[in-house]
Image: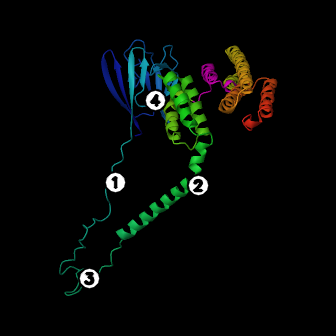
Amino acid sequence: MGAVARFVVSEAGRSKSYRIGRAQFSVGGASECTVHLADPGASGVHLRISRGEKGWVLEHAGSPAEVRVNGHPTKRWFLRPGDEISIAGARIAFEGEEAPAAPAPAPATGPPVAPEGVGPRAPAAGHPGAQPAGHVRHHPPAKRGLPAAAIFGISLGAVGVGILALFLHLRSGAGREEAKAAGPGEAEEFVSTVLEKFERENLAPPSRPAARAYLKLCDEFLQRFAGHPKAGWVRKQRSTYAPVAMEWDPPILADAMFEARTNVGRHRYAAARQALEDFLRRNPAAPDAAEAKGEIATIESNARERFEDRFDRCRDELARAAFSVGETRRKLLDQAVAYLDEAEQAATGLEAALLAKVRDERERVRREFPDFAGRGR
């Protein structure tokens, strides 16, 4: 028998537990369903649950009434312990699965083995196998394993090799340099201002579009800060929301819209357009294609406004810097170039003329502020 799924069904104030070892079973109001529901709002076969390579999968059977998991309507869902399935007035709690019972050990078929320290009994006198009186029977020496001291020495040597390898890795700085590549403190800032903030604002409770957008943010962190200590936490977060995101399904417009608006909130307009353009490329004849195209036009308009605002602010700071000295001048030039970076980010993917303006302005910074060498990029 395979893994056993455990469910608790609650309806009309009563609860019933199920332990199901089938690879596939049905849930609904029909008498032949493995999990029978008395609620009149349940269809005959409302949903099916099957055991796949990745765990237990819920699939809506196509009835008019919806299925909700943790409050979210769904057609397909990878179940995790603690998930609550709602069908009309019935609630089904998935408690997880039990591992299949280990088979009992086969009975021994060989001759009985004498207890340790007890040799085979000698045949009685007069028995055909008895030895003459005074005969001493010699047994071959017992095979022995390695002495305990040798085993300890080998283990200690293995530990020493591992510690040496770790020391050399840290000495070389290979693990640290990956995290430093994007700048000190930037990884922590990404976790607090992007990942944790997104989780608080969009994943309580989680939805498929929000989970998909969150996984993209996790991937961005792991690509930029692969060697950072927080990478383990980010991978765990990704695993937590992956079943909700259902990445194996092609994106629908709601998924693309959420990802696009998430990127607009971070002023990543090129990535926002890309999410919607990917959707249109996969679904060129989709009925909601016009809505996607309208959203792209809105994003481009916002990107141009952002470009003009940041470009004008850059020029204002440069004008002030021209009449300043010392630390004040340096701060103004720093801020001007930061605005120019933001203008370039907004212009990416728009007309080439906008990026040309950014290049010209950088050249002007290098030419008119030679003491600011290198900062104009």
Residue 216 position within the rendered picture, expressed as x and y whole percent measured from the top left? 59, 31
Q: Mark 3 is on which residue type?
A: Arg
Q: Mark 4 is on which residue type?
A: Leu
Q: Which residue in the structure is indicated by mark 1?
A: 106
Q: Which residue in the structure is indicated by mark 4?
A: 79
Q: CA distance from mark 3 to mark 2?
A: 65 Å
Residue 298 position within the rendered picture, expressed as x and y whole percent measured from the top left? 69, 15
Q: Which residue in the structure is indicated by mark 2?
A: 172
Query: Of the residues tagged 2 and 1, which is closer to the observer?
Result: 2
Q: Residue at x 43, y 15 (%)?
A: 42
Q: Are marks 4 and 2 in contact (CB under 8 Å)?
A: no
Q: If you read the primary sequence from the N terminus, does the residue marked by circle 1 or circle 4 appear first?
A: 4
Q: CA distance from mark 3 to mark 4?
A: 67 Å
The main secondary structure of the magenta stretch is helix
Q: Within 10 angstroms of label 4, few (less than 14), some, or many (20 or more) residues?
A: many
Q: Which residue in the structure is indicated by mark 3?
A: 137
Q: Secondary structure at mark 1?
A: loop
Q: Nearer the viewer, residue 164 or 338?
A: 338
Q: Mark 2 is on which residue type?
A: Ser
Query: Of the residues tagged 4 and 2, which is closer to the observer?
Result: 2
Residue 295 position within the rendered picture, expressed as x and y whole percent measured from the top left? 68, 16
Q: Is residue 368 visible?
A: yes
Q: Which residues are magenta?
A: 247-271
